[in-house]
Amino acid sequence: MTDELGLFSERHTDHGRYRAARRRPPKRRKSRRITVWLGVLVVIGLIGAGVWFGLTQVLGIDIGGYDDYSGAGESDVVVEIPDGASTAVIAGVLHDGGVVASTKAFVKAAEGDNRVLGIQPGFYVMRTHVSGKDAVTRILTPDARKGRLEIRGGYQLDDITKLDGGVEPGIVKRLSTASCAEVNGKSTCVPVEELRKVAETGDLAALGVPEWAVPDASKLEPKRRLEGLVQPGVYDVKPGSTAQELWQKVISESATRLQAIGMPKMASDTGFSAYQVLVMASLIEREGIEKDFAKVSRVTYNRLAAQPQMKLAYDSTVNYVLDRPAIRTKEADRAKAGAYNTYANFGLPPGPISSPSKGALEAAAKPADGKWLFFVRCQKDGTSCFAETAEQHDANVRQAQANGAY
């Protein structure tokens, strides 16, 4: 009995050990879970630290001291401030360009100066390794911003001799001027001659000319190929760029603006090609003021469709070749032969005569309703009077002369 009990006891004991052995794995699984959670916490901690460090650098959160330079700086550098940039973003641009030692140096120096909020997008010539305070002072100096090019509706590539003998710079001259800056004692100006050479000989597609405009533009005499393809507006060109890079910047941005207006699709229901609508818009721009654009457009359509044929007889096309803006042209000039002379030729000229604005393009694509065939500037503010018959037009001309407007 004792042996049996002993045997039973021994067996019972072995069975208990067996069950105990089977319960050990859960302890190892619990240990693994703890290790995993510890790893997750470490990763979260590292991410949080990285985010906090980024915020302190970009937003200038004060957690103590910060790096800052002193002295007059080392060299000039050109930096680009993007559109809509906050103080923190500007600080980041300056830090990346080697201007300031830390973003916080600029942010702290800019605190309380509301002028920093008005910094415009574009290129600025700065000094490297300067204090945050000096960087703020420099970027707020009007002379710091470079490369600003403004084009208005009606501008043409070449200079125009005004009635008073003065000269209105053309787009080529304005682009040359915009390229100028003094960087480390050297001028970045690109001469007019270099810009003309690229405009006359460069590959139009490579310069950024829209695909729909390339075939017609390539047929024009070289110096007029880019006429009308620079949209009115403000462009920022980088000092130090080559003539090729300057044109690519301006023409490609202009192509984007033309597309935003609706070109070439807006021409689809006009009966004219997109390039012809561009040409028409350039005439409208030079022949009238904005409130009359749609009416001038209608006169253009009506004359082109008239039977028997009518010539446009626009003074602006005669003046274009002469590079002058006279309201009235001389009979001798109107009699001169030339592809752009709409007194001598039927139809539209072969290319644009100016840079048409959005309003002129929209008017060219959608003229006002009317039967007008004539118009003349009859008010000194540029307002035109429109007529359906030659007799009505003659009366308008007499009134314009009486008003001192023609």
Image: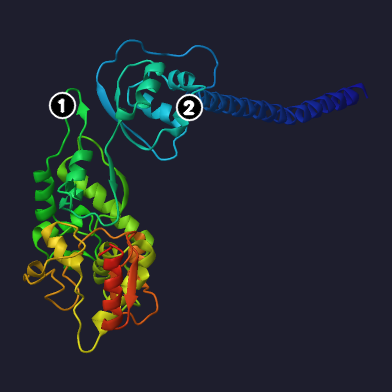
Q: Is residue 308 above or below residue 379?
A: below
Q: Are marks 1 and 2 in contact (CB under 8 Å)?
A: no
Q: Position of residue 311 (x, y in %)?
A: 18, 79
Three-letter residue code for mark 2 = Val
Within 10 angstroms of label 1, few (less than 14), some, or many (20 or more) residues?
Answer: few
- Residue 45: name its quadrant: top right
Question: Which residue is nearer to you in this view: 349 or 311?
Answer: 311
Q: Is residue 162 left or right of residue 118?
A: left
Question: Which residue is nearer to you in this view: 131 or 28?
Answer: 131
Which disc is residue 123 wearing? none
Q: Is residue 7 left or right of residue 174?
A: right
Q: Is residue 350 left or right of residue 369?
A: left
Decide if residue 267 is in sight here: no
Mark 1 vs mark 2: give the one in front: 1
Q: Residue at x 24, y 80 (%)?
A: 304
Query: Mark 1 and mark 2: span between their CA atoms?
Result: 33 Å
Q: Position of residue 110 (x, y in %)?
A: 47, 22
**Residue at the farthest front position:** 402
Model colouring: rainbow
Q: Which residue is mark 2?
A: 58
Q: Is residue 379 left or right of residue 88?
A: left
Q: Which residue is mark 1?
A: 186
Question: In terms of secondary structure, where does tag 1 sit?
Answer: strand
Three-letter residue code for mark 1 = Lys
